[in-house]
Image (cartoon, helix red, strand yellow):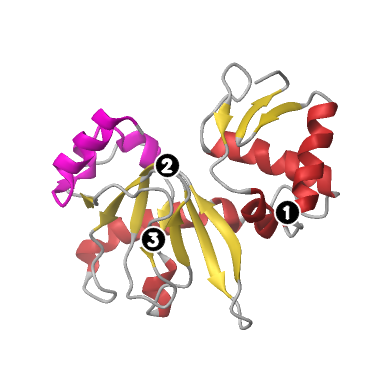
């Protein structure tokens, strides 16, 4: 994120607004919103590594404006497993309203900005029906609701499917311009159920096959970086 963009976001942080008046409304919601339907407050920008919510924390709902958040779940042995990503236009934390607490930790994988949605408490009347219906429909369409496109594939194809899925969700072409993967090799492996070394070998194989080019975290599909 450029310095000017960070400055602009700091200027609107903690200011609640109607999402219908936001220029990015269609990116977040996929359609024009009627006024007074969704209200949100822009949170202070998140630097890479900053945590937005903690597993077990109080219910709160956010929508990603820019960047990428990685979702982690703590395991009994003290380790953590990556269970998902959130990219612009995707919800973070909706499950917490049904369960009474956050089900995962959400951490910025790259400099990110989010908006906190004003959500009424459950059972507060029909006046909030339109908002709750919109949130339920949006939640149902979130990527993890469907089978992962890499499920059951061998390691190389699993990594290739993950990168393709990422570029689609992030609305990147990946072919004309290189882009940076926000996740480390270890995080990609945790998400896909692979060892980090296997991810490295898979990326090398895809590069040798000229299906993509990799330099560090910079990737270009089908060409040199």
- Residue 196 location in percent, x, y? 73, 54
Is 173 or 123 nearer to us in this picture? 173
Q: Residue at x 24, y 50 (%)?
A: 44
Q: Which residue is identified by label 1?
A: 196
Magenta stretch, overall SS: helix
Region of the chain picked out in magenta, as a range: 2-30
Residue sitting at x 77%, y 46%:
158
Near mark 2 (Cα within 10 A), the count class, few <14, some 14-19 or many ≥20, is many
Q: Which mark is residue 51?
A: 3
Q: CA distance from mark 2 to mark 3?
A: 13 Å
Measuring from the top left, give residue 32's x and y in whole percent.
Answer: 30, 35
Q: Residue furthest bottom?
A: 76
Marking on residue 52? none
How crowded pointer 3 is (Cα within 10 Å; few <14, some 14-19, many 20+) is rated as some
In the figure, residue 25 lies in which quadrant?
top left
Residue 35: in sight, yes or no?
Answer: no
On screen, residue 122 above or below 202: below
In the depicted view, which residue is nearer to us: 191 or 145? 191
* Figure quadrant of the C terminus: top right
Q: Secondary structure at mark 1?
A: helix
Callout in the foreground (2, 1): 1
**With respect to residue 71, does 221 lie above or below?**
above
From the image, state whether disc 2 or disc 3 is nearer to you.
Answer: 3
Does any portion of residue 223 appear in the rendered image? yes
- Residue contact at pointers 2 and 1, CB within 8 angstroms: no
Instruction: Identify which residue is drawn at 36% across, 58% down.
Output: 133
Q: Which residue is mark 2?
A: 67
The residue positioned 60% from the left and 48% from the top of the image is: 184
- Is 76 on the left or on the right of 38, as rendered? right
Closer to the camera, 78 or 74?
Answer: 78
Q: Earlier in the sequence, mark 3 or mark 1?
A: 3
């Amino acid at each position: 994120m450029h310095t000017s963009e960070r400055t602009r976001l700091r200027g609107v942080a903690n200011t609640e607004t109607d999402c219908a008046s936001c220029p990015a409304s269609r990116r977040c919601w996929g359609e024009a919103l009627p006024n007074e339907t969704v209200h949100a407050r822009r949170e202070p920008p998140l630097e890479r590594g900053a945590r937005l919510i903690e597993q077990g924390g109080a219910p709160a709902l956010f929508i990603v404006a820019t960047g990428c958040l990685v979702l982690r779940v703590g395991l009994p042995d003290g380790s953590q497993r990556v269970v998902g990503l959130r990219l612009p236009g995707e919800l973070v934390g909706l499950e917490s309203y049904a369960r009474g607490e956050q089900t995962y930790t959400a951490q910025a994988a790259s400099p990110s900005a989010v908006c906190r949605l004003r959500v009424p408490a459950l059972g507060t009347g029909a006046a909030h029906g339109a908002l709750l219906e919109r949130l339920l429909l949006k939640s149902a369409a979130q990527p993890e609701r469907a089978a992962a496109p890499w499920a059951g594939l061998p390691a190389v194809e699993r990594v290739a499917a993950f990168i393709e899925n990422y570029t689609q969700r992030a609305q990147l072409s990946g072919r004309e311009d290189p882009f940076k993967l926000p996740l480390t090799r270890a995080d990609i492996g945790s998400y896909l159920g692979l060892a980090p070394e296997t991810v490295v070998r898979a990326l090398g194989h895809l590069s040798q096959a000229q299906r993509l080019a990799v330099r560090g975290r910079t990737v270009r599909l089908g060409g040199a970086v």
